Amino acid sequence: MKKLILSTAAILGIATAADAQFVRYGVKGGLDLSTAPINSAFNNIENKLSPGVYVGGLAEMSFRSRSDKFKLQVEANYTLSQLKNEYDYRNFDHSAKTTLHTINIPVLAKYFFTPRFSLYAGPTANFNLGSKFSNTNFTGAKPDANVFQLGAMVGANYYIYKGFFVEARYHAVFPDVYENGNPIEYGTASNFQVGIGYKFR
Protein backbone atom coordinates (compact mmCIF):
# COMPACT_ATOMS: atom_id res chain seq x y z
CA MET A 1 0.00 0.00 0.00
CA LYS A 2 2.81 2.42 0.87
CA LYS A 3 4.57 1.65 -2.44
CA LEU A 4 1.32 2.35 -4.29
CA ILE A 5 0.89 5.70 -2.52
CA LEU A 6 4.49 6.70 -3.24
CA SER A 7 4.31 5.63 -6.88
CA THR A 8 1.05 7.53 -7.42
CA ALA A 9 2.44 10.66 -5.74
CA ALA A 10 5.62 10.47 -7.83
CA ILE A 11 3.68 10.12 -11.10
CA LEU A 12 1.36 13.01 -10.20
CA GLY A 13 4.30 15.15 -9.14
CA ILE A 14 6.23 14.52 -12.37
CA ALA A 15 3.14 15.15 -14.50
CA THR A 16 2.33 18.38 -12.66
CA ALA A 17 5.91 19.64 -12.77
CA ALA A 18 6.03 18.99 -16.51
CA ASP A 19 3.09 21.40 -16.98
CA ALA A 20 4.72 24.19 -14.97
CA GLN A 21 5.68 27.23 -17.03
CA PHE A 22 7.81 28.94 -14.38
CA VAL A 23 9.86 27.41 -11.56
CA ARG A 24 11.67 29.23 -8.76
CA TYR A 25 14.06 27.45 -6.44
CA GLY A 26 14.92 28.31 -2.86
CA VAL A 27 16.51 27.28 0.40
CA LYS A 28 15.16 27.41 3.94
CA GLY A 29 15.84 26.42 7.53
CA GLY A 30 14.70 27.01 11.06
CA LEU A 31 13.52 25.74 14.42
CA ASP A 32 11.43 22.58 14.86
CA LEU A 33 9.43 22.03 18.07
CA SER A 34 8.06 18.48 18.36
CA THR A 35 5.81 16.53 20.68
CA ALA A 36 3.86 13.26 20.59
CA PRO A 37 1.58 11.49 23.08
CA ILE A 38 2.32 8.04 24.48
CA ASN A 39 -0.42 5.46 23.99
CA SER A 40 0.17 3.66 27.26
CA ALA A 41 -1.21 2.71 30.65
CA PHE A 42 1.53 4.73 32.39
CA ASN A 43 0.40 7.25 34.99
CA ASN A 44 0.83 11.05 35.03
CA ILE A 45 2.11 11.25 31.47
CA GLU A 46 3.59 14.60 30.40
CA ASN A 47 4.29 15.19 26.71
CA LYS A 48 7.13 17.68 26.38
CA LEU A 49 7.67 20.15 23.52
CA SER A 50 11.29 19.60 22.43
CA PRO A 51 13.55 21.61 20.10
CA GLY A 52 15.14 20.46 16.86
CA VAL A 53 16.05 21.94 13.47
CA TYR A 54 15.09 21.65 9.82
CA VAL A 55 16.88 22.68 6.62
CA GLY A 56 16.17 22.07 2.96
CA GLY A 57 15.22 23.31 -0.48
CA LEU A 58 12.08 24.04 -2.47
CA ALA A 59 10.77 24.37 -6.00
CA GLU A 60 7.80 26.71 -6.49
CA MET A 61 5.90 26.17 -9.74
CA SER A 62 3.57 28.53 -11.63
CA PHE A 63 1.40 27.30 -14.49
CA ARG A 64 0.24 30.40 -16.41
CA SER A 65 2.43 33.31 -15.36
CA ARG A 66 4.88 34.27 -12.64
CA SER A 67 2.13 36.30 -10.97
CA ASP A 68 -0.25 33.33 -10.54
CA LYS A 69 -2.00 33.38 -7.19
CA PHE A 70 -2.11 29.60 -7.12
CA LYS A 71 1.19 27.72 -7.17
CA LEU A 72 2.54 24.27 -6.36
CA GLN A 73 5.49 23.95 -3.99
CA VAL A 74 7.58 20.78 -3.60
CA GLU A 75 10.21 20.57 -0.88
CA ALA A 76 12.93 18.24 0.37
CA ASN A 77 13.96 18.88 3.98
CA TYR A 78 16.18 17.25 6.56
CA THR A 79 14.66 17.41 10.05
CA LEU A 80 16.24 16.58 13.40
CA SER A 81 13.38 16.19 15.88
CA GLN A 82 13.01 14.98 19.45
CA LEU A 83 10.07 13.43 21.27
CA LYS A 84 10.24 13.64 25.07
CA ASN A 85 7.81 12.24 27.63
CA GLU A 86 7.73 11.86 31.40
CA TYR A 87 5.55 9.36 33.27
CA ASP A 88 5.11 7.29 36.43
CA TYR A 89 5.71 3.54 36.31
CA ARG A 90 5.51 1.36 39.41
CA ASN A 91 5.62 4.47 41.61
CA PHE A 92 8.86 5.71 40.04
CA ASP A 93 9.40 8.72 37.78
CA HIS A 94 10.63 7.88 34.28
CA SER A 95 11.55 9.86 31.19
CA ALA A 96 11.73 8.72 27.57
CA LYS A 97 13.25 10.41 24.52
CA THR A 98 13.32 9.52 20.84
CA THR A 99 15.63 11.39 18.46
CA LEU A 100 14.72 11.13 14.77
CA HIS A 101 16.69 12.01 11.64
CA THR A 102 14.15 12.39 8.84
CA ILE A 103 13.85 13.42 5.21
CA ASN A 104 10.48 15.14 4.66
CA ILE A 105 9.02 15.66 1.18
CA PRO A 106 5.93 17.93 1.23
CA VAL A 107 3.81 18.54 -1.88
CA LEU A 108 1.94 21.77 -1.14
CA ALA A 109 -0.87 23.69 -2.82
CA LYS A 110 -0.05 27.36 -2.26
CA TYR A 111 -2.27 30.43 -2.62
CA PHE A 112 -1.08 34.05 -2.56
CA PHE A 113 -3.67 36.35 -0.96
CA THR A 114 -1.31 39.28 -1.58
CA PRO A 115 2.01 39.40 -3.46
CA ARG A 116 3.79 39.00 -0.10
CA PHE A 117 1.53 36.67 1.92
CA SER A 118 0.51 33.09 1.12
CA LEU A 119 -1.02 30.03 2.77
CA TYR A 120 -0.31 26.41 1.80
CA ALA A 121 -1.30 22.86 2.66
CA GLY A 122 -0.64 19.33 1.45
CA PRO A 123 0.55 15.79 2.19
CA THR A 124 4.07 14.81 3.15
CA ALA A 125 6.20 11.69 2.72
CA ASN A 126 8.59 11.15 5.63
CA PHE A 127 11.59 8.83 5.54
CA ASN A 128 13.30 8.01 8.85
CA LEU A 129 17.05 7.79 8.26
CA GLY A 130 17.88 6.87 11.84
CA SER A 131 16.59 6.98 15.39
CA LYS A 132 17.80 6.70 18.96
CA PHE A 133 15.66 5.85 21.95
CA SER A 134 16.51 6.33 25.59
CA ASN A 135 14.64 6.16 28.88
CA THR A 136 15.50 5.91 32.55
CA ASN A 137 16.62 2.30 32.25
CA PHE A 138 17.87 1.93 28.67
CA THR A 139 19.88 3.81 26.04
CA GLY A 140 20.66 2.55 22.57
CA ALA A 141 19.95 2.55 18.86
CA LYS A 142 16.64 1.05 17.78
CA PRO A 143 16.82 -0.78 14.44
CA ASP A 144 13.04 -1.30 14.30
CA ALA A 145 11.99 2.28 13.52
CA ASN A 146 9.54 2.49 10.63
CA VAL A 147 11.34 3.70 7.51
CA PHE A 148 8.28 5.50 6.09
CA GLN A 149 5.49 7.60 7.61
CA LEU A 150 2.76 9.71 6.05
CA GLY A 151 2.03 13.25 7.17
CA ALA A 152 0.16 16.47 6.45
CA MET A 153 1.32 20.09 6.56
CA VAL A 154 -0.31 23.53 6.72
CA GLY A 155 1.51 26.81 6.92
CA ALA A 156 2.04 30.40 5.86
CA ASN A 157 4.90 32.50 4.59
CA TYR A 158 5.55 36.20 4.21
CA TYR A 159 8.12 37.87 1.95
CA ILE A 160 10.06 40.46 3.91
CA TYR A 161 12.52 41.69 1.26
CA LYS A 162 12.82 40.61 -2.36
CA GLY A 163 13.36 36.82 -2.21
CA PHE A 164 13.72 36.60 1.58
CA PHE A 165 10.75 35.18 3.50
CA VAL A 166 9.71 33.95 6.93
CA GLU A 167 7.42 30.97 7.48
CA ALA A 168 5.43 29.28 10.23
CA ARG A 169 3.81 25.87 9.83
CA TYR A 170 2.36 22.79 11.47
CA HIS A 171 3.41 19.29 10.39
CA ALA A 172 1.53 16.21 11.64
CA VAL A 173 3.29 12.84 11.22
CA PHE A 174 1.13 9.80 11.67
CA PRO A 175 2.02 6.75 13.80
CA ASP A 176 3.82 4.60 14.31
CA VAL A 177 7.41 5.70 14.87
CA TYR A 178 8.41 2.17 15.83
CA GLU A 179 7.28 -1.15 14.41
CA ASN A 180 4.87 -3.01 16.68
CA GLY A 181 4.81 -0.03 19.08
CA ASN A 182 8.18 -1.00 20.53
CA PRO A 183 9.67 0.35 22.77
CA ILE A 184 7.12 3.18 23.15
CA GLU A 185 3.89 3.42 21.20
CA TYR A 186 3.48 7.03 20.09
CA GLY A 187 0.41 8.78 18.80
CA THR A 188 0.47 11.37 16.02
CA ALA A 189 3.58 13.56 16.26
CA SER A 190 3.07 17.34 16.08
CA ASN A 191 5.88 19.46 14.65
CA PHE A 192 5.72 23.26 14.88
CA GLN A 193 8.25 24.94 12.60
CA VAL A 194 9.38 28.55 12.31
CA GLY A 195 12.06 29.49 9.82
CA ILE A 196 13.54 31.81 7.25
CA GLY A 197 14.39 31.23 3.62
CA TYR A 198 15.43 32.71 0.30
CA LYS A 199 13.83 32.12 -3.09
CA PHE A 200 16.07 32.74 -6.09
CA ARG A 201 14.84 34.81 -9.03
Image (cartoon, helix red, strand yellow):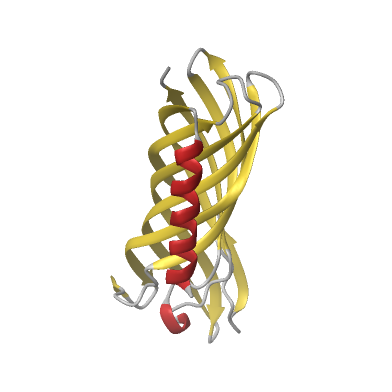
- Number of numbered discs overlaid on the protein picture: 0
Residue 127: in sight, yes or no? yes
> In the displayed structure, would residue 33 be above or below residue 95?
above
> In the displayed structure, would residue 190 be above or below residue 3?
above
> In the displayed structure, would residue 86 be above or below residue 110?
below
Residue 136, x across and y down, in percent: 39, 73
Residue 84: in sight, yes or no? no
Residue 104, x across and y down, in percent: 43, 52
Question: Which residue is found at the position 51% from the left and 32% from the top?
Answer: 61
Query: Nearest the camera: 153 or 131?
Result: 153
Name the residue at the bottom extreme.
90
Residue 197, x across and y down, in percent: 45, 27
Residue 142, x across and y down, in percent: 31, 74
> In the displayed structure, would residue 51 be above or below residue 35?
above
Q: Is 80 situated left or right of 193 in this image?
A: left
Which image quadrant: the C terminus? top left
Question: Which residue is found at the position 41% from the left and 28% from the top?
Answer: 26
Question: Which residue is found at the position 50% from the left and 34% from the top?
Answer: 20
Q: Is 162 situated left or right of 135 in this image?
A: right
Name the residue at the top extreme.
162
Query: Nearest the camera: 161 or 32?
Result: 161
Query: Nearest the camera: 65 or 53?
Result: 65
